[in-house]
Image (cartoon, grey):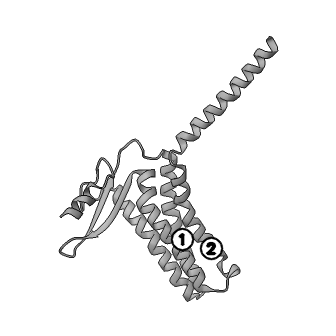
């Protein structure tokens, strides 16, 4: 009986440790897929840029692949990961007078990511444009003009998201109030019905 009790105690400790580890990981990542895809497209674009001349001799296919990856990154960060990981969303629209108007939303709901996810979001948003800026100078000084055009396009995608989220986090005043309760699309439906 004593041996059986020791085994049950060890099993209980193992199950308890596994449950604690799972709960700890759950606290670190509420949105693991969003965290993954926040970095996936931008890191893959950088890796493809670094390896492109070795793998393929076609500049056009490399250009199209990298721009496609960065387009996916731009869309996913702007529309999905920003909303889930840090509770921010922004967009730019043109009003009836042709004036550019920035619109910002902030959610304080229960479904916002953890502090770890927020760090992943902001680090990915800041570090990747710095990497592309480094690529800009290396392309410029090595006189690779065709690659320079690709790097400028890449910086544009990355910098647009960074600029939008920095303005959103600072509580931009244009458009609508920066704090809304949800992302239900009521504002969108109002614009469509007008």
Q: Which numbered marker is on residue 40?
A: none
- Identify which residue, 38 or 190, lies in the foreground: 190
Tally the marks: 2
**Residue drawn 56% across the image and 84% down it:** 147
**Residue drawn 44% across the image and 69% down it:** 159
The mark that comes first in sequence, 2 or 1, is: 2
- Identify which residue, 130 or 82, lies in the foreground: 82
Q: Is residue 174 left or right of residue 145?
A: left
Q: Is residue 70 left or right of residue 169?
A: right
Above or below residue 99? Residue 173 is above
Give the residue furthest to the top.
Answer: 1
Disc 2 to disc 1: CB gap under 8 Å: yes
Query: Mark 2 and mark 1: span between their CA atoms?
Result: 10 Å
* Whole-percent x, y for residue 54 in the image: 70, 80
* Whole-percent x, y for residue 62 in the image: 60, 80
Q: Which numbered marker is on residue 48?
A: 2
Q: Is residue 48 left or right of residue 94?
A: right
* Quarter of the figure with the C terminus: bottom left
- Identify which residue, 146 or 74, lies in the foreground: 74
Q: Would you call the spot at circle 2 few (<14 residues within 10 Å), some (14-19), or many (20 or more)? A: some
Give the residue furthest to the front.
Answer: 193
* Whole-percent x, y for residue 101 in the image: 25, 68
Identify the residue position indicated by label 1 in the image: 69
* Quarter of the figure with the N terminus: top right
Q: Would you call the spot at circle 1 few (<14 residues within 10 Å), some (14-19), or many (20 or more)? A: many
């Amino acid at each position: 009986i004593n041996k059986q009790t020791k085994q049950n105690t060890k099993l209980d400790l193992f199950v308890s440790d596994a449950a604690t580890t799972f709960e700890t990981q759950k606290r670190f990542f509420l949105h693991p897929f969003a965290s993954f895809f926040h970095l996936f497209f931008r890191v893959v674009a950088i890796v493809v840029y670094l390896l492109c001349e070795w793998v393929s001799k076609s500049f056009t296919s490399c250009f199209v692949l990298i721009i496609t990856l960065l387009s996916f990154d731009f869309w996913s960060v702007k529309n999905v990961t920003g909303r889930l990981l840090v509770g921010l969303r922004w967009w730019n629209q043109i009003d009836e007078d042709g004036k550019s108007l920035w619109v910002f939303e902030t959610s304080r709901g229960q479904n916002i990511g953890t502090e770890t996810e927020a760090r992943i979001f902001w680090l990915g948003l800041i570090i990747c444009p710095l990497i592309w800026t480094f690529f800009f100078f290396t392309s410029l000084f090595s006189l690779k003009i065709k690659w320079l055009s690709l790097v400028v396009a890449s910086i544009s995608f990355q910098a647009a998201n960074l600029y939008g989220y920095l303005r959103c986090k600072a509580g931009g005043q244009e458009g609508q109030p920066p704090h809304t309760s949800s992302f239900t699309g009521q504002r969108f439906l109002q614009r469509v019905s007008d």
